[in-house]
Image: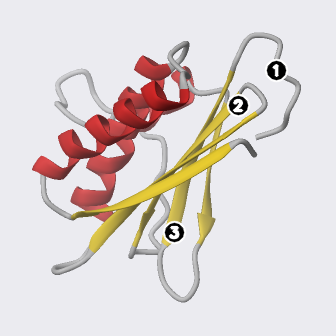
Amino acid sequence: MIASTQQFFPALPESVRQAREFAAMVLNGWGLLARADDIRLCLSELATNSVVHGTGPGHSFLVRLDAGDDVVRLEVHDSHRRRPAVREPAATETSGRGLRLVAALSDEWGVEEHAPDGKIVWSCFKGAGATTPC
């Protein structure tokens, strides 16, 4: 691993924008701009899910970014064990497509339990020719 950083955000709608700005600043500082738009969009979806479905009153969510040899791993930690699921929303529904976007834009994504309570939803972004596993 080359670099790692993390930051907590309160479970509030405005924190999603703040998390995106945090990621943009970090990726820019690391000089990792090739997939920065994909990473920020996936972060936006995962942070929104965390605020809406993954945190209780008075809790926060954690954003963690790890960079390795041409790979960036994004994690969003929250306080609920309920695992997110990819949905097939009706054409008239205005939500429910976030994880489809994450699956389409990232090279891999998944969910891990986080003790004592909670989960980590992660996504991985590889550069061209990267052979490092997520």
Image coords of residue 111 (percent x, y): 59, 57
Identify residue type, mark 2: Val
Amino acid type indicated by mark 3: Lys
Residue at the image point whose x is 38% and y is 59% from the top: 7
Q: Which circle, 2 or 3, is nearer the viewer?
A: 2
Return the mark for residue 130. 1
Q: Secondary structure at mark 2?
A: strand
Q: Residues within 10 Å of mark 2 (few under 14, many from 20)?
A: many
- Residue where numbered disc 3 is placed: 119
Is residue 49 placed above or below 33 in the rendered structure? below
The 10 Å Cα crowd at callout 1, few under 14, some 14 to 19, many 20 or more, is few
The reply to whether discs 2 and 1 touch (Cβ–Cβ < 8 Å) is yes
Name the one closer to the observer, 41 or 111: 41
Q: Is residue 128 above or below residue 53?
A: above
Of the numbered discs 2 and 3, the one sitting upstream in the chain is 2
Give the residue displayed 28% in from the left and 62% down from the top: 53
Q: Earlier in the sequence, mark 3 or mark 1?
A: 3
Q: Is tag 2's residue or tag 1's residue first in the polypeptide sequence?
A: 2
Q: Position of residue 103 (x, y in %)?
A: 55, 30
User: Which residue, given by chain and number where applicable, does mark 2 sit on?
Assistant: 71
**Location of the C terminus (image quadrant):** top right
46 vs 107, left or right, is left
Which numbered circle lies on residue 64? none
